[in-house]
Structures are given as C-alpha cells and as structure tokens.
Amino acid sequence: MNQKLISVFPNSISIQIKREDLLHPFVSGNKFRKLKYNLLQAKVENHDTILTFGGAFSNHIAAVAYAGYENGIKTFGIIRGDELFDQIDENPTLKFAQNCGMLFKFVSREDYRLKSEISFLENLKEQFGSFYLIPEGGTNELAIKGCEEILTKNDAEFDYICCAVGTGGTISGIINSVLPHQKVLGFPALKGDFLKDEIRNFVQNVNWELITDYHFGGYAKVNEELIAFINHFYTENQIPLDPVYTAKMVFGVIDMINNNYFAANSKILLIHTGGLQGVSGMNIKLKKKQLQTIAING
Ligand SMILES: *Cc1c(COP(=O)(O)O)cnc(C)c1O
C-alpha cells in the first residue's frame, strides 16, 4: 500500500506514502494497529467491556467505538470536557461513537487529568463494573506490538521513515521495527518536551529523532497555511490528509526538503496514520470562524 508521490523534489529525493488510512473504513490507520492485540487480549481475559479515554474529536474514541460494535464488545468513553454532554449531536466524532453503541461519561478537564490514578480508576470500576482498560490514545505495550507491523520487508529500501506523534505509541512500534540503516523522524502534533522520555520507555534503538517545529501552535491547532496545504496536496496527489496529525508531518517533511535537511537521493517513507474522521469536526470549527475549510472527500 505504498504510494509514490509524483511531485519531483530537488536532489533526486523521493517520497512515498504508506496508506495506513486505507486499512479499515472506520478504524483507520494507527488506531487499527494499536487496537489489534488489545482486542485479542480483552477476549482472552473474558472482558465484555472496554473503557477508554479521549477528547471531543478523538480518532481513538471513534476507533474503539467501532471496534467494539464490530466485535460485540460494550464500550465506555470517558470524554474530556463536561460541557460536551449536550453537544453530541453537533459533534460528528461523538455522534459516530454513540451510534456504534459507546456510552459516555463526560468529565471536567481537572478530573480528566487524574485519569491514570488508581483511585480514579477504582471509582470507574464501581460505576461501570469490570472492564478492559485502554489508555488515552490507545498506547500500551500491546499497541506498540501492533505498530511494529506497520513496516514490512518491502520498506527496507527507505532511508527515512516519518510519522506524526501524539502519545508516542505509533512511533515506538516503528522505531522497534526499523533496520540499522534507517532513521525515524517523528513530528509531534502537540507542544511539549515530555514525549522523548515516553518513547525511550518503549524502545531500544537510537536511530530516531523528534522534529518539534511543526505543531502549528499545539494539539488540534491549525492556521490558514496548513488548511491551504491540505487542499493543495489533495488536488495534486488525490491523497487526503487530516489537519491534526498527518498534514503537519507532511508539511514538515516538505519544508525540510526545501531547507536541505535531507541528503541527495534520500528515499523517504511517510506513514499516513489516518485520522480522516476528524475532518468534518474541524470543518465545523473553521466554518464558525469563517475560515477556509478542508476540501477533501476522504
Ligand atoms: C492518534 C494518531 C496519531 C498519534 O499516534 P500516537 O501513537 O498517539 O503517537 C497520529 N496520527 C493519527 C492520524 C492519529 O489518529
């Protein structure tokens, strides 16, 4: 599923894109990889319920909700932001998850921060009974194991593997599966320096680096340049990018090519981690601000 980009870059640098977004119509990209072994484990442990966490437009929430529906597992979503409880109908992600059967508990931003504390989880067990817990963003050891399957032996020709970074699970799986001559570049979609240490907990290899210049102001923040880039990229390549993760990564890689970061003849593989379900939610926000919207029919 690698796709060549036809645009010609200087110095014979070539880019291919791995279309993980096409893995599944609803559980797209890295969320499919991250859920695979967790769903198997939930079954092994005889759980009929999965509980997880996410924000208002979370790709992970949408993915877990659909995976639960498809596998006959009940799903609970602990959603960040207690103001959202009466906005489900206006929120395409929450609406989708609800249609898949997910039940929500909306918590304040303060409470949400406590989500990994034992007392918070114990409290949830009292409310919901026993469940298989998947952390925010889906990152745990089993998720990383799933992400180790993103690269295949056909990808050995690449010098660089580039991917967007949220919690660091996906890049950890990729780092664990690259060959010694390959380097992994991660593009955090949010501000902050904590990610390096998170990733170090999960990996042994050292041939990776985080490129922190392309978060566009922080998580889910966009500007007109980024939206114009997504639309232009779609017109040129017929490949839809999501505004929260993949667009920032692809924008960054192209900018770095233009700034001569890569040596001549470098072969670069971009991982399209999906996330396209978030486009309609972003477009609602852009429309409210009377800004240009994302024009992809992905
Ligand atoms: C969740 C997500 C990421 C980030 O993955 P992590 O494993 O949390 O780093 C990247 N891209 C897309 C499209 C995502 O939905």
Image: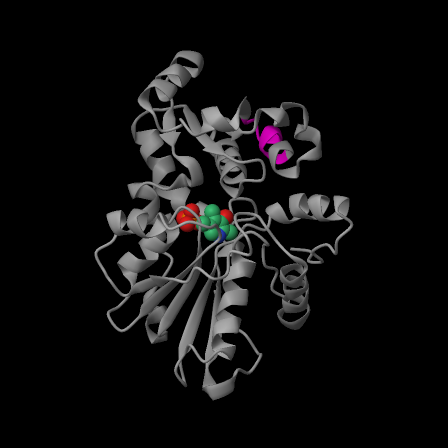
Residue at 32 percent across and 40 percent down: it is 140
Q: Position of residue 87 (x, y in %)?
A: 68, 28
Residue at 64 percent across and 49 percent down: it is 279
Q: Is residue 171 left or right of residue 101?
A: left
Asked whether residue 13 appears in the rendered view, the answer is yes
Asked whether residue 3 appears in the rendered view, the answer is no
Q: Residue furthest right?
A: 290
Q: Position of residue 44 (x, y in %)?
A: 30, 30
Q: Quadrant of the C terminus?
A: bottom right
Residue 247 vs 41, above or below: the answer is: below
Q: Residue furthest left?
A: 204
Query: In front here: 31 or 251?
Result: 251
Q: Position of residue 173 (x, y in %)?
A: 32, 53
Say how the picture is coloured.
one colour
The image quadrant that residue 151 belongs to is bottom left
Q: Residue furthest top?
A: 126
Q: Is residue 205 left or right of residue 235?
A: left
Residue at 45 percent across and 80 percent down: it is 260
Residue 150 vs 283, above or below: the answer is: below
Query: In front here: 187 or 5?
Result: 187
Residue at 37 percent across and 21 percent down: it is 121
Residue 5 vs 98, above or below: the answer is: below
User: Magenta includes 114?
Assistant: no
Query: In front here: 101 or 138?
Result: 138
Q: Is residue 192 left or right of residue 105?
A: left
Query: In front here: 172 or 151?
Result: 172
User: Magenta includes 99?
Assistant: yes
- Magenta residues (range): 96-102
Q: Position of residue 118 (x, y in %)?
A: 31, 22
